[in-house]
Amino acid sequence: MVFSFIVPTRLQRATQRVLHRLFHTRNGLFAGLHIALEAAVYGEYAWEVFGYCQELEFNTGFLLLPYLLLAVNTGAFVLCALTNPGTITESNQELYLRVYAHDGVMFRKGVMCRTCHMEKPARSKHCSVCNCCVHRFDHHCVWVNNCIGAFNMRYFLIYLFTLTAMAADIAIITVAFLIQVVLLSNLMYGSYVDEQGQEHEVEIPFLIQHLFLIFPRIVFMLGFVIVLSLVLGAYCCFTLYLALTNQTSNEWYKWRRYKCPHCQAQQPHDKHTAYRNAYSKGVWINIKEIIKPPTVSERKKKP
Ligand SMILES: [Zn+2]
Ligand SMILES: [Zn+2]
């Protein structure tokens, strides 16, 4: 009785500790998992799809494109993981306070970080995983094991877009290969007999089943990259929208949770707070700001 009581509690605590370590401390687990998945997909592509497509005389440039994307993606991944996103320290805090003005709605002057005991510059946020405040904080990305802030956002965008392009490109090549196999084998014009002895014309579900039996690894990989393309594609659209409107994920989230301090209305409104995104300066300048973030030294020079 006592034993059964103790074990679940201990198990619970152990699980909590593991979960805390996974999601609340910096660790390379997700980065490792990401590399392993990439290796599995590219291994399958190089091992089977590439060879079969060459036999079917696919254009070599078309087949090599996923490798080019992989090279760019790996570079962006390394830069994103190793670049300081904009850690705010005692020595640079004064300068970061001058980069963005407090908008008075989402970011108020004089608010202190309870952990770092420093005034929070506008658009910054304390990351509990990295245990520091980050300038123009977007989010903490477990896949690159780093915060995404002002100085690595550009690398993160390249990383995200090339990752989506990699998944979509491999999906397109694999689908083109399987279509070619179906056309060459004349499978579409055949028929099959089911368990009840009835004859049916070949339809898409039967074809997929049939292809899975011939190329199980390829079809499995195709399913994975299709799902990945859709999920990443949606996330790309969201990130692009944020980039074009000069918002961070943190600001977007804060905005959705915003309550008017005067009347608790869910959105800032003209009666109490006429809120406009104070940081957006038009699409072109917003993009330029991500490519070349306004640096502290640049601002310092201004009177
Ligand atoms: Zn802090
Ligand atoms: Zn972080």
Image (cartoon, rainbow, N blue to C red):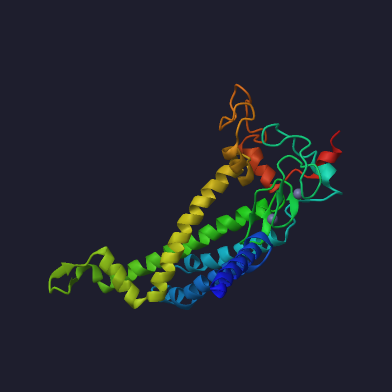
Is 4 left or right of 74, judged from the image as shown? left
Task: Decide which of 14, 102 is in the foreground and name it.
Answer: 14
Q: Is residue 217 above or below residue 260?
A: below
Residue at 81%, 39% in the rendered image: 299
Number of on-image labels: 0
Task: Decide which of 266, 97 is in the foreground and name it.
Answer: 266
Is 55 left or right of 273, judged from the image as shown? left
Q: Is residue 78 above or below residue 294?
A: below
Would you say residue 58 is visible in this rendering?
Answer: no
Q: Give the image location of residue 111, x and y in percent.
A: 76, 38
Task: Decide which of 269, 62 is in the foreground and name it.
Answer: 269
Residue 67: which quarter of the image?
bottom right
Residue 143: which quarter of the image?
bottom right
Q: Give the image location of residue 277, x and y in percent.
A: 63, 33
Residue at 75%, 53% in the rendered image: 132
Q: Residue furthest top?
A: 271
Q: Give the image location of residue 44, x and y in percent.
A: 47, 75
Which of the image's four quarters has the C terminus? top right
Q: Give the image location of residue 215, x and y in percent.
A: 37, 76
Residue at 52%, 62% in the rendered image: 166
Would you say residue 12 is visible in this rendering?
Answer: yes
Task: Decide which of 125, 203 is in the foreground and name it.
Answer: 125
Q: Is residue 125 above or below residue 282?
A: below
Q: Is residue 121 above or below residue 139?
A: above
